[in-house]
Image (cartoon, rainbow, N blue to C red):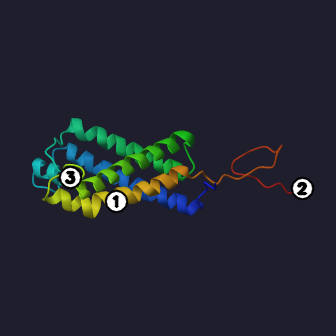
Amino acid sequence: MNNTMKDTTRRRTGQALAALLAADGLVHLYWATGLTWPAPDERTLSLAVLGSEVSFGPPVVLPLAALTLTGAAAVLAHAHGRAGRPARLVTAAVAAGLAVRGLAGLGWAAGLLDSPADGPFRTLNLALYTPACLGFGWAAARLARARPNWPTYPPGTTRSWPPTSRTS
C-alpha cells in the first residue's frame, strides 16, 4: 500500500490542521482570561460549546489550550517532514481525538447520547462541530499515514542534506 502524499498536499493538509488546532488553542487561552466571547457569560458559553454547564476557568481550559497548541506544532512538523516518529504519533492522536469527537457528535445528533434537545449546542453540533471534527479527523488520519517523500540515495553513497550532485 502506498503511504505517500504529494509534498504540496501533505504540507497544505498539515497547515490547515495546524491552523484549526492553533485557533482552538488560542480561543481556550482567551477563555482562560475570564472573557466569554462569543457568549455573554460562562454559563451560556458552556451550554453552547458543550451542551451542559461546565467551568471555563483556567484549570480546565489551560490544559486544553496546551494540548491543542502542542498538537498544532506536531502536525505542522510532521507535514513538513520534521520531528520524525513523535510528530507522526501526535498527528495520529489528533486524528483519533477528532474522530472520537466527530462520532460522539453523530451519536448526539441521532439521539443515542444524551444532549439538550434544543438550544445552541444542538445547532452548532450539527452545523459546525461534528462536520469539522469528521472532516479534519479524516485529513489528520491521512496525514498521519503519509511518509515524507525523502530523496533516495544509491547504495554506498554518503547521505547529506541537501543532496549534492556530483559532476566530474
* Residue found at x 36% / y 48%: 100
Q: Nearer the viewer, residue 37 or 164?
A: 37
Identify the residue shown where x is 37% and y is 50%. 98
Could you say where residue 24 lies in the image, as x and y percent from the top left? 31, 51
User: Could you tell me the amino acid type at mark 3?
Assistant: Val
Quote the CA–CA distance across marks 3 and 2.
65 Å
**Callout 3–callout 1 Cβ contact below 8 Å:** no
Distance from the alpha carbon under mark 3 to that under mark 1: 14 Å
Q: Earlier in the sequence, mark 3 or mark 1?
A: 3
Q: How crowded is the residue under tag 2: few (<14 C-alpha within 10 Å), some, or many (20+)?
A: few
User: Circle 2 is placed at which residue position?
Assistant: 168
**Quadrant including the C terminus:** bottom right
- Label 1: which residue? 132
Tell me which label, 2 or 1, sits earlier in the chain: 1
Q: Amino acid at mark 1?
A: Ala
Badge 3 crowding class, 10 Å Cα cut-off, few under 14, some 14 to 19, many 20 or more, is: some
**Foreground: disc 3 or disc 2:** 3
Q: Secondary structure at mark 1?
A: helix
Q: Dot 2: what SS? A: loop
Mark 3 highlights which residue?
A: 49
